[in-house]
Amino acid sequence: KIRPLIERVKELGMDAVAVTDHGNLHGAVEFHRTARELGVRPILGIEAYIAPGDRRERKATGAQDGGFHLVLLAETNEGWQNLLRLSSDAFLNGFYYKPRMDRETLSQWSTGIIAINGHLGSSIAHHLCRYEDSKDESHWEAALEEARWHAATFCDGDGDEPRFYIELQRHDVQRQLDINPHLVRLARELDLPLVAD
């Protein structure tokens, strides 16, 4: 619940917090209002579902038809407006199992948005899990290609400030622990920043 979350964040001495609902921005207004009221900076975002191909395609492929996960955070007011566009289009044009975005919409509305590759449900993790299982270099190359595309899409233009991060998680899910070294290697190879979550 939003109020207890923000109260706990404040109690811990943190000055900002994000809420990234899966596939929607439904909690954003209440979250923003409550965070401001309690003196905590709200970071508005969404845990987006990204179609494996065209978001308008509605055929079962067996490969993440509901979409890969990608965390998107508004860095600026323009970024917030772009999150609204992305979310609206995902429901209106991309809905198949879940409201989905795709490379076309992300490229069109990426300005002012910070992206984080996401957990085991991300496209990068998908390829890295296959690489971990098979050691087939084509899966490693596919993960690199995904990361390169995201880094090129979510960039500030002059390369000074990264807007695409590789996410690490550490918990009791062995699959995540198995791919964490690959995530670190990928980030180092492409000079991408890491974020722990």
Image (spheres, rainbow, N blue to C red):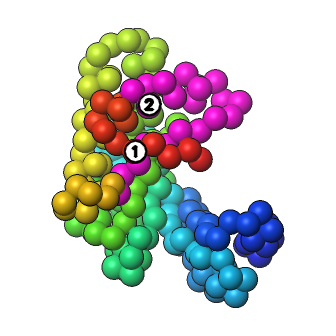
Q: Is residue 33 above or below residue 63?
A: below
- Pointer 1 local density, CA inside 10 Å: few below 14, some 14–19, many at least 20: some
Which residue position holds label 2? Answer: 184
Q: Position of residue 141 (x, y in %)?
A: 26, 25
Which residue appears at 45% of the width and 42% of the height? 194
Work out how far the residue at label 1 is from the one at label 2, CA to CA, in angstroms. 9 Å
Q: Element type at marker 2?
A: helix
Q: Which mark is residue 193?
A: 1
Residue 123 included in the magenta stretch of the image: no
Is residue 173 one of those drawn in magenta?
Answer: yes
| Residue 159 locus on image (x, y percent) | 23, 55
Q: Residue at x 64, y 24 (%)?
A: 174
Q: Which residue range is magenta in the image?
A: 163-185
Q: Please state which amino acid type lies under the numbered disc 2.
A: Val
The front one of 130 and 77 is 77
Mark 1 lies on a secondary structure that is: loop
Quadrant in which the N terminus appears: bottom right
Residue 128 in view of the camera = no
